[in-house]
Image (spheres, rainbow, N blue to C red):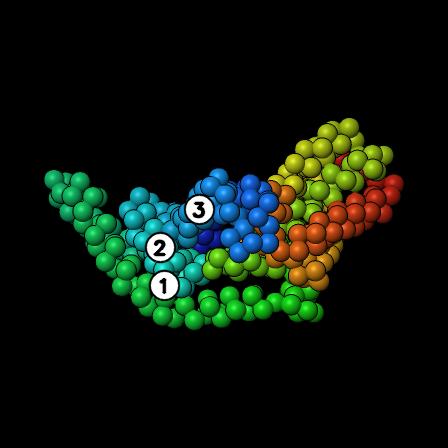
Amino acid sequence: MKKRLNAYKNMMSGVSHMLPFAVAGGIFIALSFIFDASNSGAIDFGSGTAIAAWFNDTGHLVMSFMLPILSGFIAYSIADRPGLVPGFIAGALATTGDSGFIGALIGGFLAGYFMLILIKIFVKLPASLTSLKAIFILPILGTLIISFSMIGVNLIIGPISNGLQGFFDGLSGPLAIVICFIAGGMMAIDMGGPINKIAYLFGVASITGGVSSILMAAVMAGGMTPPLGIALATLIFKNRFTEEEIKIGKSNWMMGATFVTEGAIPFAHAKPKVVLPAIIAGSAIAGALIGFFETSLAAPHGGIFVIFIMHNWWGFIIALVVGMIVTALLLEIFLVNKKIKVE
C-alpha cells in the first residue's frame, strides 16, 4: 500500500519506462537528418530521401508512444496489471486532447486509483468469474471511467498545457537565460534524483507538442556537463585524483556524451562539499549559455547524437565546452591539497 501511495515512485515508474522510447525516437529522428544532409535548409529536411523519411517517420512513431507509456506505467505502479489498459488510454487521450504531458501525468494517477477502487469493489466476486473480471469487467469499466475523466482533464489542463507551450516557445532574451540557468543547475544538484527529474520533466513537457525548445536544450546541456566536466578534470588535473578515479573519469566521457548525468555520482558522494558546487556551477553556466544563444532541441534524449537536429547547434557545443571547463577548473581550485578518494 505504501508503494501505491508514493506519488514520486509511481511517477518515476512511468518516467523510467518512457525514457527508452524518448531515446530511441530522438536518435532515429537525428539519424534522419544525417541521411538527409544534402537536403539541409529544405522544407522537408529529414524526409528528402527514402531512408531519411523512414528514420524520421519511425522516430516520430516511437516518440508518439511516450505519453501512453508514461501514464500506463504510472497506473501500473499503483494498481498493477489492471491499471495498464486505462493508463495507456489516459496517455493517448491526453495526446489527442491537447493536455499533453501534464494531462498524461494526471491521467496516469487517475487511472491507477480508479482501478484500485474497482479492484476493491469486485474483490468478493466468485472464483468462477475471476478470469472474466481480469479480461472483461475491469478493462471495460476502467476504459469507460478514464475516458470520461479525460474529457474533464483535457478541458481543464488543455488550455494550461497550451499556455505553457506558448510560454516555452516564446522564451528568449534575459528571461530565457535566467530560466535556463536555473534548469541547468537543477540537473546537477542530485543527478537523477527528484530535483533533476523535475527539471527534466519540464524540459520534456516543453517539447511534447512536437516543437523545438530552448528549455529542453538547456536541460540536456545541464545534464551532460557534470560527468564531462569531471572527465576533463581527471584528464588534465591527474594529481588531484587516484588511479581508480582517473579510470572512472574515462568512463564519464561516454556517459556525459550520451546524457547520463549519473556518471558524476561517485565523485559527488565521495566529497559533496567540493564536487557539488563545481558541477552545479558548470551546469548552470552551460544552461545560461543555451538561453543566450537560443539553442533549441525537439528530442528529449540522445546527447551528442541529437546535435544534428538542434537549432543553433553550435551554441550547444560552446555551452557544453564552457560548462565542462568551468567544472574542471573549480574542481582544481577546490581540491587544492585534497583528493576525492572515490570508493
Q: Toward the viewer: 22 or 122?
A: 22
Left-right relation of 245 to 300: right
Asked if residue 4 shows in the view, the reply is no
Q: Which amino acid type corresponds to the residue marked 1 in the rendered image?
A: Gly
Q: Position of residue 104 (x, y in %)?
A: 40, 57
Q: Secondary structure at mark 2?
A: helix
The CA span between labels 1 and 3 is 22 Å
Instruction: Give the residue pinned by disc 2.
Output: 92
What label does residue 97 carry, if any?
A: 1
Q: Residues within 10 Å of mark 2 (few under 14, many from 20)?
A: many
Please tell me which residue is depicted at 31% across the width and 43% down the height of the picture.
81
Q: Secondary structure at mark 3?
A: helix
What label does residue 304 carry, if any?
A: none
Dots 1, 3 in contact, CB < 8 A: no
Instruction: Give the residue pinned by disc 3.
Output: 57
Left-right relation of 341 to 254: right
Q: Is residue 249 above or below residue 105?
A: above
Please tell me which residue is depicted at 25% across the width and 55% down the height of the picture.
143
Q: Position of residue 142 (x, y in %)?
A: 25, 54
